Image (spheres, grey):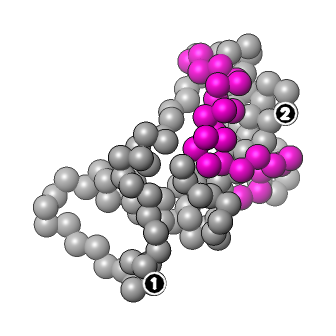
Amino acid sequence: MLDLAEEDPEAAAARFSALNLLRRVKSPQAIVATCVQALLQPSPDPDRTEALSQTVAVGESPGLEAFVGWLADAGYVREREVYEPGRYAVKGGIVDVWPPAARLPSRIEFAGDDVESLRDFNPLDQRS
């Protein structure tokens, strides 16, 4: 589980993005330059991070309840509205979620168990 509630959301998002990038780098000659403070921060196990990743696309059928359960299990924090990374909100058949590495939150609209639409939204005015 990622502990998304225990730290600065922007720092968590930046760290998560960097870890994802490092996981994809295949060169044995890759160099990482960082500060000592960043090295001292706990990081999730790369295999665990990958296991906690889920892709959702229009037309897929992950199921609303199953997807919301996965968000909770993955460490996302449920809120009334989504204003920062690592949070999600459920409003009927709509799930707003802000993945830690994403620039903007996403709005996922379900029709039953099927993903009917998927779009980014503005966290300030909550409009998509």
**Mark 2 surroundings: few (<14), some (14-19) or many (≥20) residues within 10 A:** few
Give the residue pinned by disc 2: 91
Image position of 93 with respect to 96: above or below: above
Q: Is residue 86 left or right of residue 94?
A: left
Q: Which residues are magenta?
A: 60-84
Residue 94's x, y, as percent? 78, 30
Q: Can residue 12 be spotted in the picture? A: yes
Give the residue pinned by disc 1: 37
Q: CA distance from mark 2 to mark 1?
A: 39 Å
Viewer-side residue, 127 vs 3? 3
Q: Is residue 2 left or right of residue 120?
A: left
Residue 4's x, y, as percent? 62, 58
What is the three-letter code of the residue carrying label 1?
Gln
Residue shown at the point (86%, 47%) measured from the top left:
80
Image position of 74 with respect to 68: above or below: below
Viewer-side residue, 78 vs 123? 78
Q: For the residue labelled by badge 2, is the local secondary structure a helix, a strand or a loop?
A: strand
The earlier-in-sequence mark between 2 and 1 is 1
Image position of 61 with respect to 94: above or below: above
Image position of 6 with respect to 34: above or below: above
Q: For the residue labelled by badge 1, is the local secondary structure a helix, a strand or a loop?
A: helix
Residue shown at the point (66%, 32%) measured from the top left:
69
Q: Is residue 122 left or right of residue 26?
A: right
What is the three-letter code of the residue carrying label 2?
Lys
